[in-house]
Amino acid sequence: MKNGMKLFAGTGNRPLAEAIAGYLGLQLGEVSISRFSDGECYVKFCESVRGVDAFVIQPTCPPVDTNLVELLIMIDALKRASAASITAVIPYYGYARQEKKDAPREPITAKLIADILTVAGANRIVTMDLHAGAIQGFFNIPVDHLTAIPLISSYIKEKGLQNIVIVSTDEGRVKTVRQVSSRLGAPIAVGYKYHPEHQKTEMTHLAGDVKGKIPIIVEDIITTGGSITECIDALLEHDCSPEIYVAATHGVLTEASFDRLNRPEIKEVIITDTVPAPPAGMIERLRVLSVAPLFGEAVRRVHEDLSITSLFY
């Protein structure tokens, strides 16, 4: 007999968790999450989870360490309460940009987090648009890697923009940009940059014809907007249209990004709700697309042992 299914939410992005549950016609399970006076996290599930397929929805977005530890404690509690299976639904996987050593004596933190999640008791991971797809290989458990590319591409297509060019801010994003390009039937341009120091980028040159075209800059994550700014400056130097669109799956937006993303050339900033959006008005032309139906359908298919690949191909 098939196990039942229960969904639980951490505090990282409860609105998304509620939307996922709504898609599935379920209520979120009851779990109490609080803090001791010294800041330690306390978790207690307020209903039986014995023998159920448990899904914990929690992005590891800022505050990253707080959300990560909360997720780990929830997984541990479910394991000790005899859940039949535990799936960590991590819409945004924090520490993904630390997936390799760029200098001596650096950690590979993305691998460390994968190990910790597994040791805590997760049997499966469901996530979206990892900064590096190879992170899936850091796990010894199944990883369902969803993508928001079809959602973002469809939204852009509905705008009916003409003479567009899909732009990657660096060579590492070319594969993703090609996916958008093929869906929209548009050419691509690629920026080449380097990191002279930690959290600083400089674009050296831009490859591709952008003259007179409307650029659609596609990123996986926007944090400070520094790479976006460098890219826009390079595009304008190459005589692109002054109408520019920016799209990213994860809008992990810091205060430093607000002024950069409000520059007049940017007609719209398109992100998804994998992490909570910034306060209203901080970015004037912000559009948030919901990935709740994608995650809801993925959760349903995981529970029913159905293919997830067919969602995207």
Image: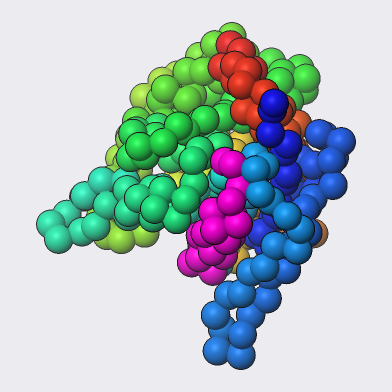
Residue 159 in the image: state x and y as whole percent.
77, 22
Q: Nearer the viewer, residue 103 or 3?
A: 3
Q: How are the colours assigned in the image?
A: rainbow
Quadrant where the N terminus is found in the figure = top right
- Asked whether 126 or 29 is in front, the reply is 29
The span shown in magenta is 64-85
**Does 55 sit left or right of 116 as displayed?**
right
Which residue appears at 54% of the width and 80% of the height?
40
Residue at the image point whose x is 67% and y is 68% from the top: 44
Whether residue 229 can be seen here? no
Q: Main secondary structure of the magenta part?
A: helix
Residue 118 screen position, x and y as percent: 41, 48
Q: Position of residue 81 (x, y in %)?
A: 60, 57
Task: Give residue 198's quadrant in the image.
Answer: bottom left
Residue that lies at the very extreme toward the bottom in this rendered image: 37
Image position of 104 (left or right of 279): left
Q: Position of residue 77 (x, y in %)?
A: 57, 61
* Residue in the image at 50% along x and 38% along y: 124
Q: Where is the C terminus found, in terms of image quarters?
A: top right
Q: Is residue 90 left or right of residue 295?
A: left
Q: Residue furthest left?
A: 104
- Closer-to-camera residue (194/143): 143
Kindly tell me whether residue 247 is visible in this rendering. yes
Please tell me how many numbered marks the rendered image carries: 0
Q: Residue at x 69, y 27 (%)?
A: 2
Inspect the magenta stretch and tell me whether residue 67 lies in it: yes
Please give left or right for residue 123 compared with residue 241 in the image.
left
Q: Is residue 243 above or below residue 261?
A: above
Residue 46 forms part of the magenta stretch: no
